Image (cartoon, rainbow, N blue to C red):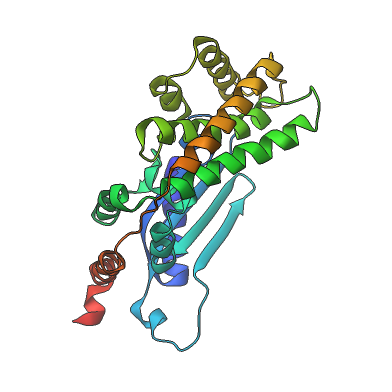
Amino acid sequence: MHEEIYPYLSSIEQQYNVKIVYACEVGSRAYGLASSKSDYDIRFIYVPHPEWYLSIDEQKDVIEKQIHPSLDLHGWEIRKALRLFRKSNPSLLEWLHSPVKYRKGEWFTGPLLDLLPEMMSPVSVLYHYMNMARRNAKKARAKGDAIALKEMLLILRPLLMCLWIKQYETFPALNYEDLLGKLNLPTNVHLSLERIRELKINGASKEAVPNQERLFRYIEDQLEEIEEYIAQLSYTRTASTEKLNTIFRETLYHKWGAFFD
């Protein structure tokens, strides 16, 4: 399937007259939780032709293509992406940290990742993942004892992301196994979460989670501690807009230099 994705990216460039500067995988394939039946969720950042910017009307800054039910492509125009980067948007930060890349664009992503330590707002990112874990836990609890592995992972992954930020004060690794390997977790919790991972990649997404009550107690305790931790963080960070403007201009020229000559 990987080899099939590259022509789709090229087709989007031709159809929309854009240049894709970065493309990656998100979801289970980026998290190391994919089974043989998992979908391909492709995300990309693109630069339109310079004439796209020479209009008095706002234009659509998103490209979406559903190739078939198991292959979805979704892209953001570069200025949209940079504005979201300035806000520490967790979805965009996940794109930039994806271990599965189809267009690396290191000359573009490198400067952004260099800016990340000075601009990432831990409060914003922690709130995002904490609320995601809580929301998914509430939904799962409402179903009683029949909580499937996939539903539990929708709670566990954002929780682990929070624990990483709390422990390392950096944006987390996306790979679930990396999270487990580098976080200080109780041995019994680590073993339970590793077992859940193994079952998921072996295709048992709908299988019920064993010993879920004990695991839920751990989740709830950790979410309370994370909320207390966030309350102690009285600062936010913002990226220099001018630095992001420079990245935008250099990328535009890099991809469409002939237009300016």
Q: Position of residue 112 (x, y in %)?
A: 30, 54
Q: Position of residue 248 (x, y in %)?
A: 30, 68
- Give the residue displayed 54% in from the left and 30% down from the top: 225
Observer-nearest of 146 and 132: 132
Q: Horizontal placement of 86 versus 244: left or right?
A: right
- Give the residue displayed 27% in from the left and 66% down from the top: 251
Observer-nearest of 214 and 45: 214
Give above or below for 10 relative to 169: below
Q: Residue 4: in sight, yes or no?
A: no
Q: Horizontal placement of 246 versus 82: left or right?
A: left
Q: Position of residue 143 (x, y in %)?
A: 80, 30
Give above or below for 161 relative to 185: below
Q: Position of residue 249 (x, y in %)?
A: 26, 71
Q: How many marks?
A: 0
Farthest bottom residue? Answer: 56
Give above or below for 246 relative to 93: below
Give above or below for 194 relative to 176: above
Q: Quadrant of residue 200?
A: top right
Q: Horizontal placement of 43 versus 22: left or right?
A: right
Q: Quadrant of the C terminus?
A: bottom left
Q: Residue 83: in sight, yes or no?
A: yes
- Give the residue displayed 42% in from the left and 61% down from the top: 81
Observer-nearest of 93 and 65: 93
